[in-house]
Image (cartoon, grey):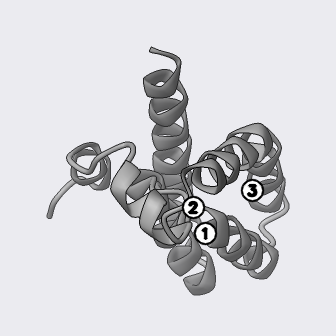
Amino acid sequence: MIDQGSKLDGLPVRDAAAALASAGGDADLARELLDVLLAGLPAEIEELRACIAEADWSALAEHAHQVRGATRYCGVPALDDAIEALERTARRGDPVLVSDDFAAVEAQANRLLETLRS
């Protein structure tokens, strides 16, 4: 079995071409979408964490789905895949897998933030 973290670390942190395509070729819009994602990411992570602490798998799945709405359009493949995996495991209600997938979301969010700061 492939470690989820290793699989995600093999994906690009940022795919500017995909972000540009999602924004209809508008570079300013692509940047704005990314900026909004980055500004809200710490609060989103905390909301996901709160759902996990309450073992509210339904709310976790819904919130992960909402976050994924943003990650899909921002050209952040590794974070997008991590969020998608968290949404799937939340729907299954498996606390062990949820914990592992949440750790992957945090790792990829940190990886994204560190990469963009460089």
3 or 1: tag closer to the N-terminus: 3
The CA distance from mark 2 to mark 1 is 5 Å
Q: Are marks 3 and 1 in contact (CB under 8 Å)?
A: no
The residue labelled by disc 3 is 48
Identify which residue, 8 or 76, lies in the foreground: 76
Looking at the image, residue 93 sits to the left or right of residue 49; the answer is left
> Residue 102, relative to residue 87: is it above or below?
above
The residue labelled by disc 1 is 68
Secondary structure under badge 2?
helix
Q: Position of residue 27 (x, y in %)?
A: 54, 51
Query: Which mark identifies residue 71?
Result: 2
Q: Position of residue 16 (x, y in %)?
A: 39, 49
Looking at the image, residue 75 sits to the left or right of residue 29; the answer is left
Q: Are marks 2 and 1 in contact (CB under 8 Å)?
A: yes
Q: Quadrant of residue 31?
A: top right
The CA distance from mark 3 to mark 1 is 12 Å
Label 2 CA crowd tier, 10 Å (few <14, some 14–19, many 20+): many
**Amino acid at pointer 2:** Thr
Front: mark 3 or 2: 2
Q: Quadrant of residue 68?
A: bottom right
The CA distance from mark 3 to mark 2 is 15 Å
Q: Quadrant of the N terminus?
A: bottom left
Identify which residue, 13 or 92, lies in the foreground: 13
**Amino acid at pointer 1:** Arg
